[in-house]
Structure formats: C-alpha cells, structure tokens
Image (cartoon, rainbow, N blue to C red):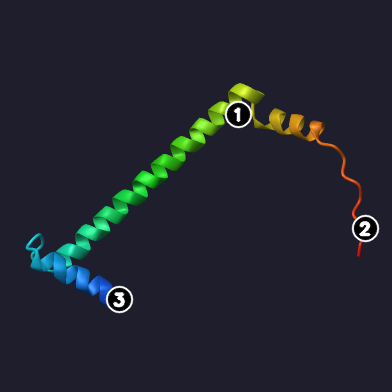
Amino acid sequence: MNVSLTPRLEELIREKVQSRMYNNASEVVREALRLLDERDRERRLREALAMASLRSIVARQCDGLPSCLNRSNENRRPQPPREDR
C-alpha cells in the first residue's frame, strides 16, 4: 500500500519516531488508525445512545411517534396558498 501524506503529517510522524515513543513510521500510522477506529466506535455508540434516549422521550410524552406527529399536524394553522411570481 502506498499512502500520500501532507508535509505536516510527514513531519509529525518523524517527530514521533525521533521522540522514541515509536520505533518507526509504520508503528505511528498503526497507532493512529487504531485511535481513529476507537473514536469512530465511540461516536457510533454515542449516537445510538442519543437515539435510544430520544425514542424514550417520545414514547413517554407522545405515546409513540405517530400519535405525536398527528397531534403536531392538528395544531398547525393552515397556510394560505402561495402565489406564483
């Protein structure tokens, strides 16, 4: 696999290797990809928890989304027809 990096990312990799935290550029890239994967999994978990929380709120307040939407539509004032310009 061949990957193109910006000069800044190349410098960052060199700095990490020179700091002796990593033995080579491959270790830096592998660690970065592991962290990216972990961040993505955490984001998906937060999104799933937020959706579950939202569903719970809707279920408690509206006896389910369809009835809540129906109530919302009933409370809307009719809009006058738009005239073409």
Residue underneath mark 2: 83
Mark 2 belongs to which amino acid? Answer: Glu
Please tell me whether mark 3 sits on a helix, a strand or a loop.
loop
Q: Earlier in the sequence, mark 2 or mark 1?
A: 1
Q: Is residue 28 above or below residue 72?
A: below
Instruction: Say whether marks 1 and 3 touch (CB < 8 Å).
Output: no
Q: Quadrant of the C terminus?
A: bottom right
Residue position marked by numbered label 1 in the rendering: 58
For the residues labelled 2 and 3, the Cα–Cα distance comes to: 53 Å
- Work out whether residue 1 can be spotted: no
Residue type at mark 3? Thr
Residue 10, percent from left and from top: 22, 74
Give the mark toward the camera: 2 or 1.
2
Q: State the quadrant of the N terminus.
A: bottom left
Tell me the residue at 91%/50% (across/down). Answer: 81
Q: Position of residue 27 (x, y in %)?
A: 15, 63
Measure how far apart labels 2 and 1 are at the Cα level.
37 Å
Residue 75: quadrant of the picture: top right
